[in-house]
Amino acid sequence: MSKNTVLILVGSLRADSTNRKLAEAIQLNAPEDLEIVIHESLGNIPFYNEDIDVEGQVPEAAAGLRAAANTADALLLVTPEHNGTMPASLKNAIDWLSRPFGAGALAGKPTAVVGTAFGQFGGVWAQDEARKAAGIAGAKVLEDVKLAVPGSMVRFAETHPKDDAEVVEQIKGIFESLASAERATAAA
């Protein structure tokens, strides 16, 4: 039996970011029937520019992102909050995945947004903005998937999210929602 693939895009480019650690915890707690792939090159993708989005000339990092998203069954965006919104790297990835207009890699793709942030609300503003952008880009946004971990810099200073029982329990809920969305998409 083949596994369904969930592609994770982490909005933070920092190697030791709490959102990167959250993505790792998600990967480690995945059910056996899911393959979780964390995309590694958001920082290498040039800002979206229609002048360079030309067939046969798309930058390698952007083409790689599109290919990974096209082969994934679902996407999971893991975002910190930068100045009250999602980081530019994640917005840029959404922009690349939205093209060509109406037929981009996000078109109809089940997509969920989660994250962690230093503030007391866990980055909900950034998550809301990412959901909005992904939806406009054509994704099938899973509005019921919620995971916003506040106080990340303190909470995960000495504990990896994979070792936080509350976070691990919330991660299980993400997988239940993704599985329901994938079943609904397959039935449609």
Image (spheres, rainbow, N blue to C red):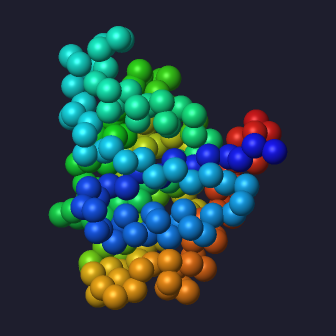
> What quarter of the picture does the N terminus occupy?
top right
Residue in front for this viewpoint, 8 or 103: 8
Q: Which quarter of the image is occupied by the C terminus?
A: top right
Q: Is residue 151 visible to the viewer in this orientation of the structure?
A: no
State the residue at coordinates (46%, 58%): 113
Decide: is 145 above or below 110. below
Residue positioned 49% across, 36% down in the render: 68
> Can residue 169 be seen at all in this image of the molecule?
yes
Front-most of residues 84 and 160: 160
Residue 91's spot in the image, x, y percent? 30, 45
Q: Residue at x 38, y 27 (%)?
A: 63
Q: Is residue 75 left or right of residue 137?
A: right
Indicate the position of residue 96 as horizontal and vertical percent values.
Answer: 34, 32
Q: Nearer the viewer, residue 66 or 185?
A: 66
Look at the picture and state if 6 lies above or below 124. Answer: above
Q: How far across and how far down the image is residue 43, in percent?
A: 25, 45
The image quarter containing residue 45 is top left
Residue drawn at x 40%, y 86% as measured from the top left: 159
**Farthest residue, direction left:** 83
Q: How many marks?
A: 0
Taking 17 as reference, is 6 left or right?
Answer: right
Report whether 1 appears left or right of 181.
right
Q: Residue 183: x, y in percent?
A: 76, 48
The part of the image, by quadrant, that contains residue 11 is: bottom left
